[in-house]
Image (cartoon, rainbow, N blue to C red):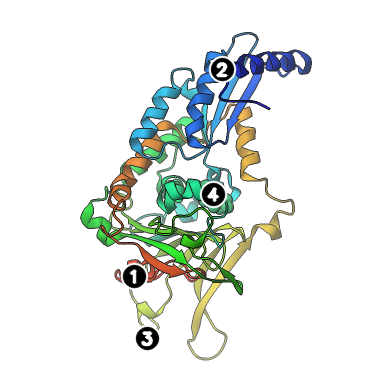
Amino acid sequence: GFDYASPEAYPVLSAKLKELEDSQETGGRCVFYLSTPPSLILPITEGLGRAGLSQESAKGRQWAHLVVEKPFGHDQASATALTESLSQYWQESQIYRIDHYLGKETVQNILVLRFANLVFESVWNRQFIDHVQITVGEAEGVGSRANYYEQAGALKDMFQNHMLQMLALVAMEPPAAFTADRYRDEKLKVLRAIRPFNSESIAECAVRGQYTAGEIDDQAVRGYREETDIKADSEVETTAALKVMIDNWRWEGVPFYLRSGKRWKRRVSEIAIVFRRVPHSMFGPMTPEQLAANTLVLKIQPAEGMGLTLEAKRPGAKNCMSALSMDFDYRDVCKEASPDAYERLLLDCMASDQTLFVQKEEVDLAWSILTPVIEAWQDPKGPSPLQFYPAGECGPKAVDDLLEKDGRSWRRL
Ligand code: BG6
């Protein structure tokens, strides 16, 4: 076993690695992958650094990469402090901050869909898109991660990373090349354009909820407060929803609605691009409002694929029409199973490719976007107070109201 707390352990590890390098001819390449509680990141990376293990081109070492799991800090200040402390021994080019959503095939497909096709990009803007919905729902509860989750909640656990990353991929400008610098810079630009939250907009545009006892798949499940190691009066949110505005030329006035939560009725993640309605209906007496808006759905999981809803004529003499969906399912086309997100990301790390990893500026920006909400939510009765929902529903009613007050509605899951 390796005792990370013991200073003697690191030189031993170093000697072991040297042995491996000599006998297995690993070419002096080394990946240190930390999937540890956040409090251990620094002690371990400093231990490695002190033992010289972060040095590249030293003692026959070609490179040393450090993979760091989320959460990267627990707020903006702690993330900045962590970045600074890491820089004592590690260069930014050695640090691979993992967001496993970026390794998912369906998430990578967002870029291919947008930038390898002409049809979508030409309508991918405020003139044609009414709004965007990003949903990550889970049937699972907090499971065995009570200690972590009590400190986190949905906002820190899902929004600071996965949700904002997906939003960035949908909203970013086309990068000139799919290389780490170009691609990550475009993500940064769009994150910078997100309208900051203030106490007024938090009351209007943010929702938090916590599950109580309920039923999923006909099985009774406990409420969050009854889960093992959860405080009986915990105010932690297990569902959150946000309406995010992006103040730039492409997206002015187009809301991005984000929702994610635990103990919903089923596991489903998708991104829906909801287009505007036709400006005029020539099919009187039908009004434009009665014609369903085209919607492009990117199905992230578990049924990976995409679908485009279109209005089509129903056969017959009358002008009857209804929405039909052109669906594409990965499983029908790609017979071999998609690689796991982690497989892809760890392979990239070994190939020294940082494209699908998160750079420090993105982490910082993501925290800064959410900090006002995180702070406001320290007070359970503060803006957008905590609301309860029975397990098996997709969050409290306020999640639906968030869209309904804008005259819109979530896609049914
Ligand atoms: C993790 C969160 O980052 O993502 C978990 O910490 C969440 O709370 C998980 O369950 C969801 O990942 P996936 O790949 O199952 O959608």
Looking at the image, residue 68 lies above or below residue 238: above
Alpha carbon separation for disc pair 2 and 4: 29 Å
Q: Is mark 4 within 8 Å of ligand 1?
A: yes
Residue 281 visible in this rendered orientation of the protein: no
Question: If you read the primary sequence from the N terminus, does the residue marked by circle 1 or circle 4 appear first?
Answer: 4
Question: If you read the primary sequence from the N terminus, does the residue marked by circle 2 or circle 1 appear first?
Answer: 2
Q: Residue furthest left?
A: 200
For image coordinates 36% across by 41% down, the residue present is 367
Q: Amino acid at mark 4?
A: Arg
The location of residue 295, given as percent across then percent down, is 46, 66
- Of circles 3 and 1, the one toward us is 1
- Of circles 2 and 1, the one toward us is 2
Q: Which mark is residue 284?
A: 3
Residue that numbered label 2 is attached to: 7
For image coordinates 48% across by 17% down, the residue present is 89
> Disc 3, disc 1: CB below 8 Å?
no
The location of residue 405, given as percent across then percent down, is 29, 70
Judged from the image, the secondary structure of the residue bearing numbered disc 2 is loop
Judged from the image, the secondary structure of the residue bearing numbered disc 3 is loop
Q: Nearer the viewer, residue 147 or 174?
A: 147
For image coordinates 40% across by 64% down, the residue present is 275
Q: Amino acid at mark 3?
A: Gly
Residue 121 visible in this rendered orientation of the protein: yes
Q: Residues within 10 Å of mark 3 (few under 14, many from 20)?
A: few
Alpha carbon separation for disc pair 3 and 4: 56 Å
Q: Nearer the viewer, residue 228 or 149?
A: 228
